[in-house]
């Protein structure tokens, strides 16, 4: 019932991230490998976040053993292609 009220309250609202700001975060893991994240900092202040109460987490394993924990060039290209295709399929203007 709660989810129904949330959806009704924000019915028809869409969010377009084309002009948003993003923050890059860097840290070092306990094993000395780098951790890099990019977050949509504008979206954190969006007043209709409750209309999208889900998160998609994707874990892609690769060997970064010879590249300081980062993907090699071929893997990096595959990751970029995956991101482009996911972004195309899950458009924010369609509510994703």
Image: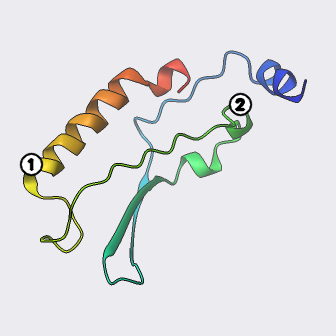
Circle 1 packing at 10 Å, graded few (<14), some (14-19), many (20+), is few
How much space separates mark 2 and mark 1, taking CA atoms? 38 Å
Say if 60 sits above or below 7 in the image.
below
Q: Where on the picture, by quarter, is residue 65? A: bottom left
Where residue 69 appears, as percent x and y from the top left, is 24, 70
Residue at x 49% of width, y 30% of height? 16
Q: Is residue 41 left or right of residue 53?
A: left
In the image, 11 versus 33, the foreground residue is 33
Circle 2 packing at 10 Å, graded few (<14), some (14-19), many (20+), is some
Say if 26 sits above or below 60 in the image.
below
Where residue 42 appears, as percent x and y from the top left, is 53, 49
Say if 92 sits above or below 77 in the image.
above
Indicate which label's residue lies in the foreground, 2 or 1.
1
Where residue 84 appears, as percent x and y from the top left, is 27, 33
As drawn, the label of residue 74 is 1
In the image, 14 versus 6, the foreground residue is 6
Which residue is situated farthest in the right direction here? Answer: 1
Q: Secondary structure at mark 2?
A: helix
Q: Secondary structure at mark 1?
A: helix
Which residue is situated farthest in the left direction here? Answer: 73
Residue at x 22% of width, y 42% of height? 80
Residue at x 40% of width, y 79% of height? 29
From the image, tell me which residue sits under label 2.
51
In the image, 95 versus 16, the foreground residue is 95
Q: Is residue 19 left or right of residue 65?
A: right
Q: Which of the two discs, 2 and 1, labels the residue nearer the N terminus?
A: 2
Q: Is residue 30 left or right of residue 66?
A: right
User: Image quadrant for the N terminus?
Assistant: top right
In the image, 18 versus 39, the foreground residue is 39
Residue at x 56% of width, y 46% of height? 43
Say if 83 sits above or below 34 in the image.
above
As drawn, the label of residue 23 is none
């Amino acid at each position: 019932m709660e989810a129904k009220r949330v959806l009704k309250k924000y019915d028809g609202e869409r969010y377009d991230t084309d002009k948003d700001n993003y923050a890059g975060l860097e840290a070092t893991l306990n094993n000395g490998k780098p951790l890099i994240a990019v977050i949509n900092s504008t979206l954190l202040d969006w007043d209709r976040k409750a209309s999208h109460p889900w998160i998609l987490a994707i874990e892609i394993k690769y060997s970064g053993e010879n590249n300081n924990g980062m993907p090699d060039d071929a893997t990096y290209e595959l990751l970029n292609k995956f991101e482009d295709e996911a972004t195309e399929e899950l458009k924010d203007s369609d509510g994703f």
